[in-house]
Amino acid sequence: MAGRVTIAQVAEEAGVSAMTVSNVVNGKPGASEETRRRVMEVAGKLGYRPNVSARNLKAGRSGLIGLIALDLTSQYGLEILRGVAHELADAEQELLVNASYHDAAREKDRIEFLSRGLVDGVLLIAPVLEDDTVKLLRRQKLPCVVIDPRRLEVPLPRLSVDNYHGMRVGTQHLIDLGHTRIAYLRGEEDLESTSVRFQGFEDAMRLAGLQVDPRLVDSCDFSYACGFRTATRLISEHRPTAIVAGADLMALGAIDAARALGLTVPADFSVVGFDDLPQAAQSFPGLTTVRQPLHDMGQKAARALLSLIEGQQLLMEHMEVATELVVRNSTALPAAGGAA
Amino acid sequence: MAGRVTIAQVAEEAGVSAMTVSNVVNGKPGASEETRRRVMEVAGKLGYRPNVSARNLKAGRSGLIGLIALDLTSQYGLEILRGVAHELADAEQELLVNASYHDAAREKDRIEFLSRGLVDGVLLIAPVLEDDTVKLLRRQKLPCVVIDPRRLEVPLPRLSVDNYHGMRVGTQHLIDLGHTRIAYLRGEEDLESTSVRFQGFEDAMRLAGLQVDPRLVDSCDFSYACGFRTATRLISEHRPTAIVAGADLMALGAIDAARALGLTVPADFSVVGFDDLPQAAQSFPGLTTVRQPLHDMGQKAARALLSLIEGQQLLMEHMEVATELVVRNSTALPAAGGAA
DNA sequence: GACGCGAGCCTTATCGTTACAGTTTCCATT
DNA sequence: AATGGAAACTGTAACGATAAGGCTCGCGTC
């Protein structure tokens, strides 16, 4: 603790009671101009800052929000974090960052710790969330909002993107260009979004009268490396003319995989991603992708959490935000004779 | 505040004093096995969690570390953050994340706020740090470590990378390949590291008997976009055969700039970066770059901060970590006839 | 001149936890 | 049986800030 100066010291030095100092510092009525001036002067001279722990103890609030992400590596989580931070800045709430490192026990541990009055609420990004953990959350009555949840038995306030339509539109874009042999890269299997996105892909294909070839579908962990590896296999074994990936990093991996196999993107091979991470715009060629408004989502989730903390009811337990197709240069008409 | 259950309630329910509950919960001696069992049982049943604010108030410590970054967008800061988080996990300290958004006033504000006993220490990543702010820091006696500082009048405990040798080695790599017309992209001008890196570049050139052409040197704000723009100008106006950038993002921009001008990297044009961000390995071609061990730096800085908080003296006020050249595929022998 | 009133300030109690200094219990010694 | 002493447990007083209520003036009013 840095601020050694207490309210009592200021009070003594200024020749008033601690209560008066408190009132002055907090701008409450009940002090003359003269006293006000003197107290402020002394407070300034001594470098007094009210102690946050003491204040929180009294107020029963910490002014802190806990954010728990799966890890601290993903641009995805970082973009959301930015949105959250942006919203919190005006609310005078601070942000406590935590990672579960994909470990359910650690996640529960973190929530347990945070709920000791350390935070006023938690924001979970694509968490593991075992039933046990959810129970703990409810029991502690800790305000909480989940972004992009796993499949939950017990409902929690949650925010997700319109994965279904997003992926339908993304797929349709390839269909409109004339692609028929389209491969699909699923994300992590226990996320709700992974199956919903795939559903969007399937429906788009079906409604266009196209077959989904199960050999052209595979799963990945959202990483560039796995995207590269899996796309390499899919392309060399089954020759699709395009691929849709459930996440940008996998899509970027797929682009480089195609390129490493001697294909030119988009002339010989088209790629569609999902997320619109900053890298998507900065890759070469620019990645055509379904945009998740991550920053916006962070803001929305934070706002919802703040109102929960204020004790308000949420209008909707499940919030959904819209996606948007961003067409760049990784998609084009299929090559005349099929891939390579 | 979520945890409604207090130590007094547990004490009453278990038929002991609050003190005993405290001792049991904290694993201190002075309680029989029998009492221990009973207290733990009651605590579990009621869902008791010790209140952190109260504990901190007593202890005069918050268990929180504040991290202040320039913004929340950079992979650079994120990598350091990861290292910090990694180190802090074992130290039972939580991480409070803040951004100054490149604004000196806001930075000072944040530090002022954090030093109200909210945090036990702060970690500053490439901060603005006006003299005023430094004074505030010292006055509050707030333990603090700075990573990659601006030029400081008053010394603060700081950690930086061996920018000088890193850049000398990176430049030497191009010289060894046979390049002589090498352009240089400086980073943000008020960072200490920007001039030190440039010094490394200059010395490497001079010692190899090469001229540094001032028309081949320009500055940027570390971004991909500015790297792209500036490299486009430098290449088209002055035809260097290679470029060294003071940061990876600028280097990636330079690669794409060269490519957009019809050059093949590395056959026609070589690029060397500085940082070794994750993107460097995932770009195509892989970026040859000078690696800063960011994760490591985060850990080291956190460790130093922790010992400052423990009241220990630092062995060195200025810590420096080594860099390492990572050769990938963005560098090669210069094309026979010079660029394009 | 007595009374009421309100501005200005102070005292007390409290938030939940824990350090410190007891007090009680009970067993081992002599 | 008396004594010593450790182990087990409790009461009190903080940590620093603040809400609620109380006291003390000085002024206006009748």
Image: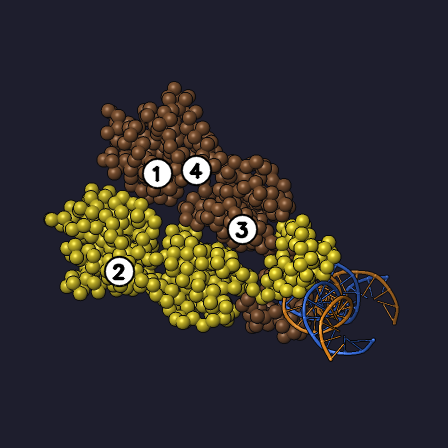
Chain colours: A yellow, B brown, C blue, D orange
Q: Quadrant of residue B60?
A: bottom right
Mark pair 1, 4: CA separation: 12 Å
Q: Which residue is the extreme one toward the top? A: B209
Instruction: Pick whichever, A256 or B204, lies toward us.
Output: B204
Which residue position holds label 3?
A: B110
User: Is the same chain shared between marks 3 and 1?
Assistant: yes
First in sequence, mark 3 or 1: give its number: 3
Instruction: Pick whichever, B37 or A72, lies toward us.
Output: A72
Tag 4: amino acid: Glu
The total number of labels drawn is: 4
User: Is the same chain shared between marks 1 and 2?
Assistant: no
Mark pair 1, 2: CA separation: 33 Å
| Camera sees residue A283 | yes
Mark pair 4, 3: CA separation: 23 Å
What is the x, y in percent for residue A172? 20, 59
For mark 2, name the chain: A
Residue in the image at 55% along x and 66% along y = B1
User: How many residues crowd mark 1 within 10 Å: few (<14), some (14–19), many (20+)?
Assistant: many
First in sequence, mark 1 or 4: give its number: 4
Indicate which disc residue B188 carries: 4
Tag 1: amino acid: Gly
Tag 2: amino acid: Met
Indicate which disc residue B227 carries: 1
